Amino acid sequence: MTQSKIRPWIINALVAAIYIVLSVGPAAFNLASGAIQFRVSEGLNHLVVFNRKYIWGIVAGVVLFDAFGPGASLLNVVFGGGQSLLALLVVSWLGPKLKTVWQRMVLNIILFTLSMCMIAWMLMIVGGATAFWPTYLTTALSELIIMSITAPIMYGLNRVLRFSERIGK
């Protein structure tokens, strides 16, 4: 295998590892699951704005955290991984039609916030929530906040790290 074929695999493995580390940090761990989910790691969702090849690392991080983190269950893996994959695929499909990085980041924030309905629904199924709308409100609001806070951080990091070039064309 050539370096150009191995590089995306290695970088996606690193993204998955960073996602997990950011999710299980001492302060974040208690707020990374349930009806209020302030996962700093969700900021990595913005990587897809720079290059769609990051999808697999992000989804792998979500799936691994949901499989082994607090509230681990098969439903958590399916819904969490599915919600992330769906939102990331839509962003990677619609994103190139937008002119600026900021427009793509706003699209990403909106899609992830709206798609939290899948997480609220899953929490209802597993019995962690009693009513859909309040659960959706808290999960969507926490996603909106964390994605909005991390957007300028990821934008600034991209200016230094050039995410689109790191993983390869």
Image: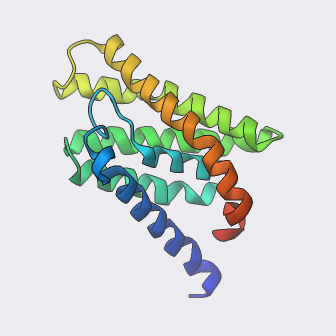
Of the 4 image quadrants, the one containing the C terminus is bottom right
Q: Is residue 15 left or right of residue 101?
A: left
Whether 50 is drawn above or below 83: the answer is: below
> Which residue is pictured at 46% across the width and 68% down the height?
14
Is residue 77 depicted above or below 11 in this figure? above
Give residue 150's position: percent from left, percent from top.
Answer: 56, 43
Q: How many marks?
A: 0
Name the outermost residue toward the front: 27
Identify the colour scheme used. rainbow
Tell me if 105 is positioned left or right of 128 in this view. Answer: right
- Closest to the observer, 73 or 152: 152
Task: Determine which quarter of the picture holds residue 6.
Answer: bottom right
**Furthest-left residue in this view:** 127
Q: Residue at x 39, y 54 (%)?
A: 22
Q: Where is residue 34 shown, x and y percent of the image?
A: 26, 32
State whether residue 160 is above or below residue 84: below
Which quadrant does the N terminus fall into? bottom right
In this image, 28 relative to 114: left or right? Answer: left
Residue 99: x %, y % from top left = 83, 40
Question: Which residue is painted at 57% across and 44% down in the image?
Answer: 89
Residue 112 lies, in percent from the top left, at: 52, 33
Residue located farthest toward the right when viewing the structure as drawn = 99
Q: Quadrant of residue 157?
A: bottom right
